[in-house]
């Protein structure tokens, strides 16, 4: 049940345990004492974000040459697990920001990297990825947002029109990686899609509303429109027509970190339940001694351990630099379902107290289902896994 131990291989290059210790101290000092109240009032955690900047979390996976910590996915996933075990929303504030940063670092021009990555790493510029639209989530090739090359020689660039929804960090952040169609006639459609950095203050780009949610409170989810929003040519990430591949490569890290969130939430459910089951007595003994509850605890603990192993295995595959859709998909599928199942079991174990706003169980129960939807639904993960199985093991 303890949080994952230090990786001795990784520790050859830097002291992983020092980093994880500082994360634990930050969580106990700055997050745990306020998480319940901030969550209940759906308040964006401004002071926590300042501490995250000091810790370097906004540059966790960005290379040191741009001011980041350059952490491998193996260490990063341990950080995400720890943060999510205390308050999952906090991990969302840097997770999609780092997917945006990964797209810039992998595919951006030297000038784009030199300008943006240090600002991303310090947290001065923060944001996320704007892919989903009112009519297209899983089927990203169906997006309608268009980016058309400007014909005005005095003002070169692209004119963007369209709408995005459910975008994390879009209100309290200040920059987004936006997926748009640059050639709607392209066949297959993904060859006509491109990725742009769009900053707050870009004329024609505005946030239209904050979305209200079941859980994942505190972090902002926004809806936005682009009405003849003009971005200069240097805001195109990499080449035109490569946007979907670029963002999908980043989503592997996204899936590993959503999986790590699943481990964190599943572990929090387990830890609270193991404690409660020893304190709560019925029929003259702790409920942990009733076999029906003991079986639940055993299954919950086994799910946490199995999920963590899958996340670590996917993170190791990612760190080799090879595509790892199957490993990331398996980790995402299993670990997020573990969070959903453990949150329901934790609620049963806590009885009426699980249903109470005074305890954390109802928060885990509201937060966990998002994990089965975000960064590609779990239905989609199953399709990705099978596609890879057929590719890797042709008959
Ligand atoms: C809190 C929150 C934060 C989010 N943050 C972001 C963000 O920062 N950036 C962003 O771009 N998006 C974000 N999203 C959107 C999220 O990525 C999408 O909701 C998700 O991709 C699913 O898309 P959809 O909701 O349109 O569902 P749909 O694509 O309409 O799917 C509906 C159902 O059909 C299933 N389905 C779809 N296609 C298939 C298929 N081929 N085979 C089998 N089943 C299928 C799905 O699994 C699902 O069960 C966020 C969503 C939430 C709730």
Image (cartoon, helix red, strand yellow):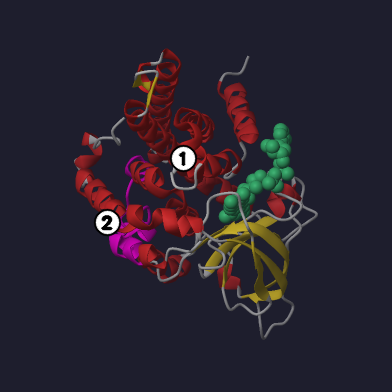
Q: Who comes first in sequence, dot 2 or dot 1?
A: 2
User: Residue 29 bears which disc, if any?
Assistant: 2
Q: Name the residue under label 1.
A: 361
- Who's the residue at 76% across and 49% down the image? 142
Residue 308 included in the magenta stretch of the image: no
* Quarter in which the N terminus is drawn: top left
Numbered disc in front, either 2 or 1: 1
Residue closest to the eye, 371 or 311: 371
Q: Position of residue 371 (x, y in %)?
A: 54, 41
User: Residue 290 bears which disc, if any?
Assistant: none
Q: In terms of secondary structure, where does tag 1 sit?
A: helix
- Who's the residue at 48% across and 30% down the image? 342
Q: What stretch is highlighted in magenta?
A: 50-77
Q: Can residue 388 be seen in this view?
A: yes
Q: How many marks?
A: 2
Number of residues whose C-alpha sits closer than 10 Å to that of mark 2, classed few (under 14), some (14–19) or many (20 or more): few
Is 297 placed above or below 78 here?
above
Q: In terms of secondary structure, where does tag 2 sit?
A: helix
Q: Position of residue 182 (x, y in %)?
A: 71, 61
Residue closest to the eye, 357 or 153: 357
């Amino acid at each position: 049940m303890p949080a994952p131990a230090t990786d001795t291989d990784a520790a050859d290059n830097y002291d992983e345990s020092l980093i994880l210790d500082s994360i634990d101290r930050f969580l106990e000092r700055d997050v745990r004492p306020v998480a319940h109240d901030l969550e209940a009032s759906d308040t964006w955690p401004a002071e926590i974000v300042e501490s995250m900047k000091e810790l370097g979390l906004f540059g966790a996976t960005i290379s040191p040459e741009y001011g980041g910590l350059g952490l491998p996915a193996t260490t990063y996933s341990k950080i995400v697990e720890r943060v999510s075990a205390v308050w999952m929303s906090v991990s969302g504030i840097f997770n999609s920001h780092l997917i945006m940063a990964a797209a810039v670092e992998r595919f951006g021009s030297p000038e784009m990297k030199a300008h943006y990555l240090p600002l991303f790493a310090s947290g001065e510029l923060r944001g996320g990825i704007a892919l989903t639209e009112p009519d297209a989530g899983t089927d990203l090739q169906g997006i309608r947002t268009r980016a058309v090359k400007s014909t005005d020689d005095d003002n070169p660039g692209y004119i963007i029109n369209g709408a995005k929804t459910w975008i994390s960090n879009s209100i309290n952040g200040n920059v987004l990686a936006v997926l748009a169609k640059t050639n709607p006639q392209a066949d297959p459609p993904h060859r006509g899609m491109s990725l742009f950095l769009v900053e707050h203050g870009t004329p024609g780009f505005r946030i239209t509303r904050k979305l209200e949610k079941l859980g994942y409170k505190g972090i902002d989810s926004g809806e936005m429109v682009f009405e003849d929003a003009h971005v200069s040519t240097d805001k195109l990430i990499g080449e035109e027509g490569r946007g979907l591949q670029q963002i999908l490569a980043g989503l592997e890290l996204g899936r590993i970190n959503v999986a790590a969130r699943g481990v964190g939430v599943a572990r929090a459910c387990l830890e609270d339940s193991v404690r409660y089951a020893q304190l709560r007595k019925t029929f003259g003994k702790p409920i942990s001694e009733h076999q029906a509850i003991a079986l639940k605890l055993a299954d919950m603990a086994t799910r946490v351990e199995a999920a963590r192993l899958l996340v670590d295995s996917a993170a190791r595959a990612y760190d080799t630099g090879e595509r790892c859709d199957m490993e990331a998909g398996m980790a995402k599928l299993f670990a997020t379902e573990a969070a959903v199942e453990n949150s329901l079991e934790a609620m049963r174990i806590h009885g009426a107290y699980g249903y109470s706003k005074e305890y954390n169980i109802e928060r885990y129960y509201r937060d966990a289902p998002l994990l089965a939807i975000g960064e590609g639904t779990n239905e989609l993960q199953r399709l990705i896994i099978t596609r890879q199985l057929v590719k890797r093991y042709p008959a």
